[in-house]
Amino acid sequence: MPSQQSSTPKVSLDEINLSNPEFWLQDRAWRSAAFRTLRNEAPYQFFEEWEFENSPIPRGPGYYALTRHDDIWHVSRHPELFCSGKGSNIGDLTVELNEFFGSMINMDDPKHFRLRSIVSRGFAPKEIKRVEDYVVTKAKELVDRVIEKFPNGECDFVEEIAAPFPLEIICEMMGIPKSDYKQILTWTNTILGVGDPELVTSLDDLLAAGLNMFSYAQALGEDRVKNPADDITSVMMNAEVDGERLTAQEFGSFFILLVVAGNETTRNAISHGMKLLTDNPDQRRIWFDNFDTHTRSAVEEIVRFATPVIHFRRTVIQDTDINGFPVKAGDKVVMWYASGNRDERVYENPDAFDVRRDINPPQVGFGAGGPHFCLGANLARREIAVMFDEIRRRLPNLRITGEPAYLQSNFINGIKRMPCSFK
Ligand code: HEM
């Protein structure tokens, strides 16, 4: 039997306001119950946007919260009706800022298609194959480092294992020198820590982190045009699609997206995965005793259960309906992946962590099959599998020993710190 999560409370509709930052301070079980109420009682609930004090971003017109798997699937796969170009987070930035921070995730065709075609070259099977060997080496190195550095067998799981692993892989892929890894991690933490008082203090910090990372990448891209090396930056900067190449500015923004999207998501999937395997020893035994047999479903289940990216938004282009619910041009709709992944219409016993769960229909943690579907999904799956394989073989007693410090965010389901013991 799959393990049952702790008791699930009942939350009434009038207690739920997804826009209120306090909602995102509640514990996971309560939030999960709130989304269950939305799915079952108000699947197209409208929420006003929150008025943030001293924010230069004007308060937007509000949004419909889509919480059912089927509706998320529909919106994601109809970009001709639901666009990304007006922003993919809830607040409204200018088109320039959206493209600066979000690159192609905030674009529609033909711009999106052009950019994706070029950067996909960096994710072709040949390139990923090359990175794969590095993923295995990196996992081994990190575990070596932890064993040597912590002879008493106790350390912070996020800081020592989950965070450096994807970061160092991306940096290696892009040809970034080791001495700059720490700086890149600080910038990405700042960009994704929006809303968490511990990580970001002001919008100025956010803009400074974005600008610094942009300049860094621009210089890296320019260098690889002149001096191509054996890295993905060189593949992307020198790729030609229909006679077009990436400009250094485009690469700068894409780099922000890639580093942010590739680090924080995978890191959180691994952290949540370790916590889930600690809390569900039966599931850990099932997977670790038959690792290769269950890896595919176990990795998908970790991403479903954790849903590291909680939502993305689209904007309605022309009056239409979502499975019968009418929406008008200009309306914002927010796809709550975290809720779609717990939809009882699609998943049996959705609040249970089950490493053998049937992976059909697909979970929506990497997106729901539309043109923006996660470009790094296969790399992320591989990273998660390799890291747990290394833990299973070399740190078989590793378990989480204290409560995680969670990130306060409506966008990233993050764990900032989490103590573990491996003796
Ligand atoms: C568990 C880890 C990850 C999760 C949960 C995740 C999740 C997502 C989600 C939800 C989207 C948007 C999908 C949509 O709107 O349809 C996305 C897009 C994207 N992801 Fe990931 N991601 C992960 C890892 C990675 C990695 C490792 C990379 C790269 C190294 C990456 C690069 C991207 C890029 C470039 C996009 C934008 C694609 C586009 O707009 O066409 N992601 N990801």
Image (spheres, helix red, strand yellow):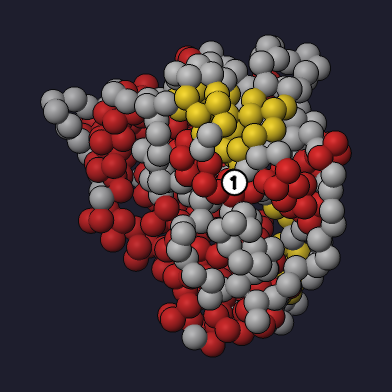
- x and y percentages locating residue 212 in the rendered image: 53, 26
- x and y percentages locating residue 136 in the rendered image: 41, 68
Q: Secondary structure at mark 1?
A: loop
* Left or right of 50 on screen, residue 171: left
Pick out the residue farthest to the bottom. 289
The residue located at (70%, 15%) in the rendering is 59
Judging by the rendered image, the residue that carries numbered circle 1 is 68
* Left or right of 397 on screen, residue 250: left
Residue nearer the viewer, 373 or 139:
373
Above or below: residue 145 compared with residue 246: below
Residue 90, image quadrant:
top right
Quadrant of the drawing holding the C terminus: bottom right
- x and y percentages locating residue 200 in the rendered image: 72, 31
> Looking at the image, can residue 131 be seen?
yes
Residue nearer the viewer, 169 or 82:
82
Quadrant of the drawing holding the N terminus: bottom right
Above or below: residue 303 compared with residue 277: above
- x and y percentages locating residue 197 in the rendered image: 79, 34
Residue 176, image quadrant:
top left
> How many marks overall?
1
The residue located at (70%, 48%) in the rendering is 40
* Left or right of 377 on screen, residue 310: right
Above or below: residue 312 compared with residue 158: above
Label 1 Cα crowd, 10 Å radius (few <14 / some 14-19 / many 20+): many
Residue type, mark 1 in image:
Arg
> Looking at the image, can residue 162 be seen?
no
Residue 282, image quadrant:
bottom right
Pick out the residue farthest to the left. 243
The residue located at (72%, 27%) in the rendering is 47
Above or below: residue 10 compared with residue 206: below
